[in-house]
Image (cartoon, rainbow, N blue to C red):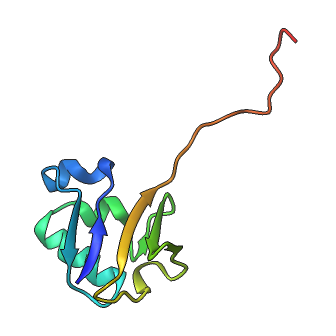
Amino acid sequence: MAYVWIPSLLRDLTGGVSEMHVPGQTVDDLVSVLENQFPGLRSRLCEGSAIRPNIAVIIDGLRSKKGLRESVSDTSEVHFVPAISGGCSNRVPSNA
């Protein structure tokens, strides 16, 4: 079973569970199992039949290019990583 880390932004749906072993052969399988156990999780991770654009799927340290179709193995480590926004602006302050 793949080892899945649940981001803190989704732990309100998991009752605080942050990681767990999940059976499946694809990311979609993992998300389906998680959705069955934690209703509402799929809609927070997916938009239609794809991973939301603000979520990255990291499998064994590499960003997935296939999203839900990406294969996983019994030894895979899977992270759903929300995009981080904000940061520094290149804008010059008006009083400069």
Instruction: Work out which residue is located at the far front of the displayed protein and give it.
Output: 75
Name above or below for residue 82 compared with residue 32. Answer: above
Name above or below for residue 2 compared with residue 86. Answer: below
Q: Quadrant of the N terminus?
A: bottom left
Closer-to-camera residue (45/59): 59
Percent position (x, y) of residue 23?
20, 84
User: In the drawing, does residue 3 fall left or right of residue 71?
Assistant: left
Q: Residue at x 17, y 50 (%)?
A: 16
Percent position (x, y) of residue 15?
12, 51
Percent position (x, y) of residue 75?
31, 85
Tag count: 0
User: In the drawing, does residue 9 fall left or right of residue 14?
Assistant: right
Q: Residue at x 35, y 63 (%)?
A: 45
Q: Kindly indicate the quadrant of the structure image that contains residue 40.
A: bottom left
Instruction: Work out which residue is located at the far top of the displayed protein and give it.
Output: 95
Q: Residue at x 80, y 28 (%)?
A: 91
Percent position (x, y) of residue 37?
11, 68
Name above or below for residue 45 compared with residue 60. Answer: above
Q: Residue at x 23, y 77 (%)?
A: 32
Closer-to-camera residue (90/5): 5
Q: Quadrant of the C terminus?
A: top right
Name above or below for residue 93 compared with residue 77. Answer: above
